[in-house]
Image (cartoon, rainbow, N blue to C red):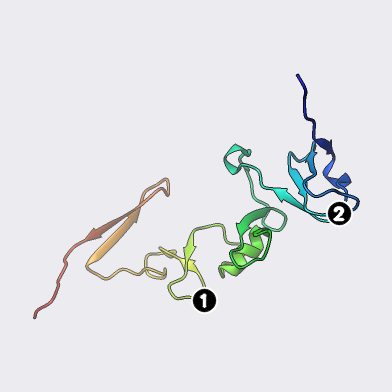
Amino acid sequence: MPRLQLKRGLKANLPSASMLAGEARFTTDRGTLHVATGATAKLPVVPAIDDLATITAVDGAADFLILHDASAVGQKEGKITVDAFKTALNIPSSDLDEKAAVVAGGTSGYIWGTNGTDGVIRMNTSMAWSKDAGNAFVTLAVGDVDCGTF
């Protein structure tokens, strides 16, 4: 039975000239596929994300996220470092905890704060919250709910 074999080699050796449109090349070290769109241009084929290995630790300055840039022309997928992404969300790169900003463009703060009074969400005296020992969830307790008069 006839077989079709793709050109293959290391990513560093991918050609940047003398390609034929439609020509496919497989990188043996990165597991990526690149298809030539012209003599000097090629597009990468994005891997199936659910088939990738899970990263156990993040290096914010060196590790990348893949984003779909809806305003881009041509190849819409791009990369951004974890730290640059956090900067875009106005979250300091040193922060590892969950944060949220209340207003667009506002500085992100800890949702529950550090002591129950200084977070993005603050408690009225008729309410109380507690966090479980494993940091998995917060319980909100409401003492009185007064909807006022009309």
Image: 53 above or below 94:
above
From the viewer's perspective, tell me whether residue 95 is left or right of residue 124: right
Q: Mark 2 is on which residue type?
A: Ala
**Residue 61 percent across, percent down from the top left:** 71, 58
**Residue 67 percent across, percent down from the top left:** 61, 58
Residue that numbered label 2 is attached to: 39
Quarter holding the N terminus is top right
Label 1 and label 2: CA atoms lie apart by 44 Å
Residue that numbered label 1 is attached to: 105
Residue toward you, 54 or 67: 67
Neighbour class for label 2 at 10 Å: few (<14), some, many (≥20)?
some
What residue is shown at x 61% (from left), y 40% (from top)? Answer: 54
What residue is shown at x 31% (from left), y 68% (from top)? Answer: 123
State the residue lying farthest toward the bottom: 150
**Residue 4 percent across, percent down from the top left:** 78, 29
Image: 21 above or below 114:
above
From the viewer's perspective, tell me whether residue 104 is left or right of residue 44: left
Q: Mark 1 is on which residue type?
A: Gly
- Which of discs 1 and 2 lies nearer the camera? The answer is 2
